[in-house]
Image: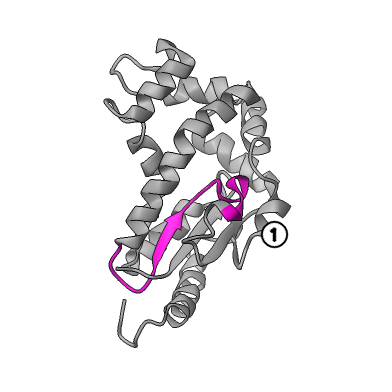
Amino acid sequence: MAHYTVALTGGIASGKSEVERRFRALGLHVADADIAAREVVAPGTPGLAEVVQAFGPGALGPDGTMDRAAMRRRVFADEAARRRLEAIIHPRVRAALRAACEAAPGPYAIAAIPLFAEAGAEAYAPWVDRVLVVDVPVEVQLERLLRRDGIDEALAWRMIRAQATRGERLAVADDVIVNDVPLEALDAEVASLHRRYLLTSGAKPGQP
């Protein structure tokens, strides 16, 4: 069981998934908040029932799952609705991530938490030991988000501004990867951090 956890965070379209992928390739267990967020509102869960109770049947798609695209448009146009949805999902996600990291094999685990800064470090203080922020300029976020999601610029800006600012994320960082470089440059940075985390977590030489 892992006894050391690193929170991996960053703004939308900062390239967290590329960093996460590299930690996985090194044999690390990664508990992903985006995956957990889907699981806690899967059909038949108390989480989805609470979403429907709060937002009505329009929150569901034809297949009975939460209509994530429709809900995204809804909550990014209405701050009160966004906070209501977050109050349903986020506590369940935090509990799932903690359980996954504590049960993970290896000397340390990665918890990929996009909204770490928004929740506040104190929400994770009991079990997160270090925070790694993937950082890019806001202009890079916007360009990547438009290209990735095929949305209009107005929605893209609402999504960016709904998150913590770049400065707020950096304020909670123990380590920072500036991800406005070619992807291959990430390999060396992640490998260096991995060696540091192995030492910090007390891993013995030869452990993954």
Amino acid at dot 1: Ala
Q: Which residue is mark 1?
A: 171
Quick check: is 110 in the magenta stretch? Answer: yes
Residue 191 x/y as whole percent: 45, 74
- Inspect this view and state whether residue 66 appears: no
- Inspect this view and state whether residue 192 appears: yes
Residue 57 x/y as whole percent: 40, 11
Residue 175 x/y as whole percent: 59, 68
Compared to residue 102, the image places residue 204 above or below, namely: below
**Is 11 situated left or right of 106 in this image?**
right
Query: How busy is the neighbourhood of tag 1: few (under 14 within 10 Å), some, or many (20 plus)?
Result: few
Which picture quadrant has residue 63? top left
Q: Quadrant of the N terminus?
A: bottom left
Judged from this view, the residue extending furthest toward the bottom is 205
Judged from this view, the residue extending furthest toward the right is 167
Residue, x 50% and y 74% (percent of image)?
Answer: 193
What element does badge 1 sit on? helix
Quick check: is 53 in the magenta stretch? Answer: no
**Is 156 situated left or right of 35 in this image?**
right
Judged from this view, the residue extending furthest toward the top is 57
Residue, x 52% and y 33% (percent of image)?
Answer: 87
Compared to residue 37, the image places residue 175 above or below, namely: below
How many labels sit on residues? 1
Residue 8 x/y as whole percent: 50, 58
**Is 82 situated left or right of 36 in this image?**
right
Which picture quadrant has residue 105? bottom left
Which region shows up in magenta? 104-122
Residue, x 52% and y 55% (percent of image)?
Answer: 124
Compared to residue 190, the image places residue 98 above or below, namely: above
Q: Quadrant of the C terminus?
A: bottom left
**Residue sitting nearer the eye, 191 or 185:** 191
